[in-house]
Amino acid sequence: MTTQQTAPTLYLTVSDTKYAYRLIGPSNPTTFPPLLMLNHVRSTIDTWDPEVINNLTSTDRQLITYDYAGLGHSTGTIAANIRGFVFDLLKFLKALLPTLNTEQVDVLGFSMGGYIAQQLVLDAPDIVRKMVLAGTGPSLGPGLVRPMNEVQSTVFNPNPGLPTIEAFFPSFTTGQEGPAWFDRSVNSRVNIAGEDEEPEMAHFTTGEDLVKLTAAYLSWDADPVPYSLLQTVQKDVLVTNGDNDLIVPTQNSFVLARQLPRANFVMFPCSGHGHLFQYAEYFAKLVDEFLDGRLPAASFSAGRAAALKR
């Protein structure tokens, strides 16, 4: 059983791009398909919180963590928009999944990873079985609210630090949860980084790469098309957020859930954008129950009305 701290870094080259990824959890899982983890805007596979990763794998589920093209340990070019991220992701998945003896993945998308997950299910629905969308919202559409400009500026600050932590974990409700998360995220691989052919740590993205990420992030926020297509998604979805998300306002996650015909919405108390890290053990239990079909599900959805009883 590998963990966030011990899983080896693997590489898969497709069309001259070398994608970095890890298979975390049991080597012969009994639960299929694997769970693809799509992280937030500045992340790498090194900065996943081990509390979330290791609690998810404790349910005998295999996880795939993945560095987007041009970021972290992956080579290639950072896509200019979310559809470009999905184009690269599909190339990676179509090469990887046959080696895992599966044609589908479940997907967990956090923050910008949730944008990518939504576009993935719109562009390639057959490859997605179920989705978890955490701390994320839809693209441009009715009913959404904008985060404060100060929060957006903090998120994309070239040097992530205390203000960024505060945006993820407002201290007036979460106390010291934020610094604890940050410490776990930046230190989970320190004992293995640079050893036995493992790469050195790839920390939170900054510099010119962050400028490109910001453009891709904001292009999604301005695009009304994905929002308009959400009601066509015929997949079971779990949407989660904290009750006071400053980065993706909690209302936007609720709007996202309402636009999806087969969605559950769960709001976590006294938490914000980083709710999944703050309540890692419970969050993992909830995700496991959802993926195993133990949460309420719609009896029918658009296009598949129940037959009338006579």
Image (tube, rainbow, N blue to C red):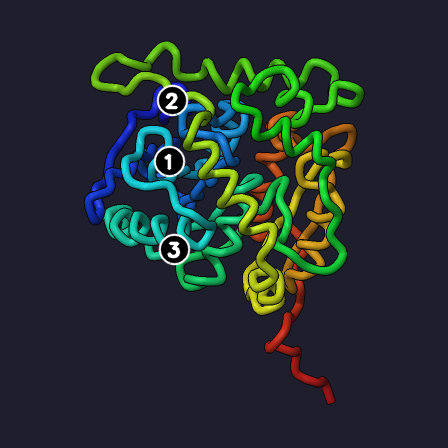
Q: Give the label on residue 91, or none.
A: none
Q: Is residue 141 above or below residue 100?
A: below
Residue at 63 percent of width and 26 percent of height: 154
Disc 2 marks which amino acid?
Answer: Ala
Disc 3 marks which amino acid?
Answer: Gln
Query: Residue 106 placed where, x, y %?
Result: 46, 49
Query: Residue 248 placed where, x, y %?
Result: 67, 40
Q: Label 1: how many residues lie within 10 Å, few (<14), some (14-19) or many (20+)?
A: many
Quadrant of the image for the C terminus? Answer: bottom right
Query: Residue 166 placed where, x, y %?
Result: 68, 21
Marks 1 and 2: in contact by CB < 8 Å? yes
In this view, the mark in front (3 or 2): 2
Query: Mark 3 or 1 closer to N-term?
Result: 1
Q: Secondary structure at mark 2?
A: loop
Q: Is residue 65 above or below residue 122?
A: above
Disc 2 target residue = 202
Residue at 37 percent of width and 33 percent of height: 71
Query: Mark 2 or 1 closer to N-term?
Result: 1
Disc 1 target residue = 67
Q: Label 2: how many residues lie within 10 Å, few (<14), some (14-19) or many (20+)?
A: some
Query: Mark 3 or 2 closer to N-term?
Result: 3
Most foreground residue, 59 or 52: 52
Disc 3 target residue = 104
CA gap between label 3 and label 2 equals: 28 Å
Disc 1 marks which amino acid?
Answer: Asp
Horizontal side, residue 232 vs residue 126: left or right: right
Q: Secondary structure at mark 1?
A: loop
Residue at 43 percent of width and 21 percent of height: 203
Most foreground residue, 51 or 109: 109
Horizontal side, residue 195 vs residue 208: left or right: left
